Image (cartoon, rainbow, N blue to C red):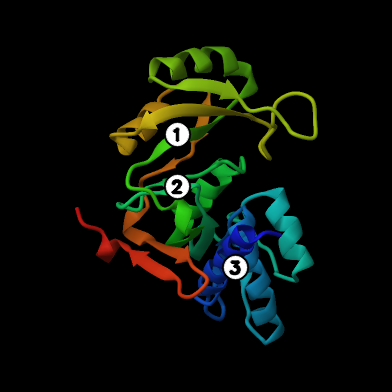
Amino acid sequence: MDTSAEALTAAKRAAGYVAADMVEDGMIIGLGTGSTVFYALERLSARISEGLRVSGIPTSFQTARRAQEYGIPLTTLDAYPVIDLALDGADQVDRHLRLIKGRGAALMREKCVAAAALRFAVVIDEQKMVPVLSGRVPVEVIPFAIRPVMTCLRGLGCIPSLRDGIKKDGPVITDNGNFIVDCEFGEIGNPEELEDLFAKIPGVVESGLFCGFTGKTTVIVGNQKKCRIITSADVIP
């Protein structure tokens, strides 16, 4: 592993550990998907072995498997429709704490869990913090409607592409049995409006824009030396 890769890994681990240390005894927590969150699971496992009592709601099969390996008890949104804290990552975070998520294809379950949480802790490395959201926005789409949805997405000014699997032939299939369309934009001037426009397209299940949780979001920006913590109180309107 080269020096830059080691630094990135250290930053992710630091952010994940800080997030895991936000968890209090008896909490029901959401468990996001992605490499930075897996460091939070690592730290939670150590805390559980020291006596911490928690239950987690995983946002993907991958996270559920990892949590089981770490000995983290699991539960569901059916059992706990309101939860204490959700831990997750992000692909981009802007200065208003709006997010792009879903490059791991778990965006719908991640948004359900974030909506159910009283607090939302987002762990990232420094390169994920951006002045303006831009680039690829994942959208989950039911297979039945993929062609008309692609047409509608082009009408929003993006270049949509069906995401293909890496170790399989054909498209990525989400844990919900749907497709992922990656929508390439330039700078996104009004993320809230775009999120609403995605939601109005028949056949779209959910988008990777997370604009509705800024008031309860804490962003933990990983660094080898000291993590930076940003809350809604730090956001300039």
**Spatial separation of the CA atoms under disc 1 and disc 2:** 10 Å
Quarter of the image where one finds residue 37: bottom right
Seen at 59% across and 59% down, the residue is 4
**Residue type at the position of mark 2:** Gln
Residue drawn at the location 72% of the way across and 49% of the way down = 61
| The quadrant where residue 11 appears | bottom right
Q: Mark 3 — residue? A: 10
Q: Which amino acid, by three-letter code, is at mark 3?
A: Ala
Observer able to see residue 202: no
Tag 3 secondary structure? helix
Q: Residue furthest bottom?
A: 50
For discs 3 and 2, the disc positioned in front in the rendered view: 3
Q: Residue at x 56, y 78 (%)?
A: 26
Q: Of discs 1 and 3, which sits in the foreground?
A: 3
Q: How many marks?
A: 3
Q: Are marks 1 and 2 in contact (CB under 8 Å)?
A: yes
* Among numbered discs 1 and 3, the one appearing first in the sequence: 3
Relative image position of residue 216 (x, y in whole percent): 36, 61
Give the number of the disc on residue 135.
1
Image check: 189 left or right of 155? left
**Residue tagged 2:** 92
Lower sequence index among marks 3 and 2: 3
Which residue lies most toward the left here? Answer: 237
Viewer-closest of 222 and 72: 222
Given residues 38 and 187, the one toward you in this image is 187
Which sits earlier in the primary sequence, circle 1 or circle 2? 2
Please state the horizontal and vertical placement of residue 183, each as a whole percent of the image.
49, 27
Q: Residues within 10 Å of mark 2 (few under 14, many from 20)?
A: many
Depicted 8 relative to depicted 207: above or below: below
Q: Which mark is residue 109?
A: none
Looking at the rendered image, the quarter that the N terminus falls into is bottom right
